[in-house]
Image (cartoon, helix red, strand yellow):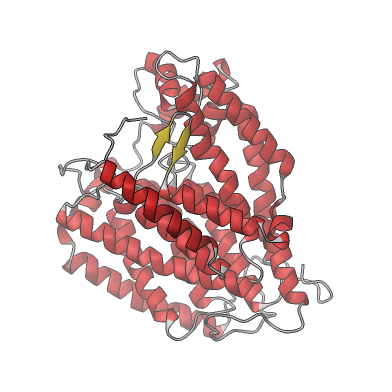
Amino acid sequence: MESLEFDPARWAFYLTAGPIALAAYFFVGSRALKLIGLLVALIFLEGVLLSWRSFFFVGFSLSSAVSYVLLASLFTDPQGRSQMSASTVAWLGFLFFAFMGAIIGSFGPRVGLGDNLIMFQMFYLEGLVYFWIGRAAFRDPSELRNVLNVLFVFGGLVAILHLFSITTGYRFYAAAGKEFHQYSDVAFRYGAVFSNPNTLAAFYAMAIPGAIISVLGWARPSALMRPIILVSMVLMGVSLLLTASRGGVGTTVLSVSIAFMLLPFGVRGVLALAAMGLVTGSLSVALLFFVFPDLLDATLGRFINEGLASVRYELWVETLRILVRNPLGVGLHVSGYLDALRPAGIFLANPHNIYLALAVNTGIPGLLFFLGLMVNTVRRANLARRVQTAEGRSVASIIFVMLIAFLISGMVEPIYGNGIKLQHFFWLIVGIASYLPTLVTAEAAAPTPAPSWDSGSRSSEGTSGWGDLQPRESNPL
């Protein structure tokens, strides 16, 4: 890790204000507010105002500190502890082979065990922390739905920061006081708070279809929240196109199509969809053509000039050859992959595919344990969609499509290893998805609905959406 100059004033502030703020955060009563605070730290502050720091074999970051405190507060609740345990064998296998990857990587010529252990903490151990938080953070679907609606509003704020950055050329500073890169002829390809434009596009591929289901699904936002989410969708759509991410745009189109198939499309649903498409589409086109014409030209030029051409195809073939020679991987640090790829004359830090990347880092067994986790989680999220309550079907459909969007986007983009933001957020979604059947069943069995922050209009709870399996009347799942 890069060594940073010690700043006594900075550390004096951290060591005085930090413990006080974290203690106050620990005693906040609402789990939903705690989770929103974690999302703020992860999305808007991590790598923007503060950067990851390491001390020997342990790394520190703002979002890590907040996540550890939140996990500790959830662990003090007996119900929270009972909700955490899940997929134990798969997680043990995944972490074991990730740790083996750290050991294997420590024999490389350029990095030692310390660098690999920090990678193990950042991308694997903390993944388990966010998984546990996702499983234990919620007690009813309405609480989850309201947090998701706030997340979609955050998506609009992310888009505003991205549009501001690519318009002005401003680059966000991390704690070291260094810009990510200078303005250049491709400077419009910048991901703002996500740094990497492909990672930003993958976030939109998760958030936009979720927002569509929230607005048009079974349990809808309040009259105040609904237009705010619609505005966020417009901003995210414009920002998505201006990332010039071919994989991100393609994944978003696919995930939005999946969202449409999950929705309860009656006559009112079709009319609502048409109205929403007309309003959001018109606003998006107006913004692109009248506010960002130069950036739109640059984006379209990239799409036309590059098309489907990419070095990825050759890269994937070479990565498969590396795995044949090294079935247990080449280590967690990027230097291991760079050294293994150098004889092919390709100098890229990852395979641009999260499944190949996980195999390179954790070995083929580690990838198999990861896939086992994903198959079980997707199955449980899809199972939860069959519940007949409005809240349950809405949140289950949102989480399902967000999970699928990440897994599809990861086929062509290295979104698991491009920083910790989206990867940690993904594990949070995985944790929520794995607990969804229990969460929505508890609501369906309850005699009265749980209180909600915004009680919006609802369609009929028994309405079946495209692609659904008809639930039994006697059993919500």
Pinpoint residue 333: horizontal percent, then vertical percent: 45, 27
Between 5 and 136, the one lying in front of the other is 5
Pinpoint residue 218: horizontal percent, then vertical percent: 59, 78
Residue displayed at 55% across by 84% down: 455
Q: Is residue 351 at all visible to an observer of this figure?
A: yes
Compared with 54, 203 (above or below) is: below
Compared with 433, 220 (above or below) is: below
Q: Quadrant of the C terminus?
A: bottom right
Q: Is residue 266 left or right of residue 222?
A: right
Q: Quadrant of the N terminus?
A: top left
Compared with 18, 386 (above or below) is: below
Residue displayed at 49% across by 41% down: 411
Residue displayed at 43% across by 49% down: 421
Between 172 and 263, the one lying in front of the other is 172
Q: Is residue 336 left or right of residue 198?
A: right
Pinpoint residue 222: horizontal percent, then vertical percent: 49, 84
Total count of labels:
0
Residue displayed at 68% across by 59% down: 80
Q: Is residue 174 at all visible to an observer of this figure?
A: no
Give the image quarter of residue 76: bottom right
Between 275 and 80, the one lying in front of the other is 80
Between 318 and 170, the one lying in front of the other is 170
Pinpoint residue 67: horizontal percent, then vertical percent: 52, 52
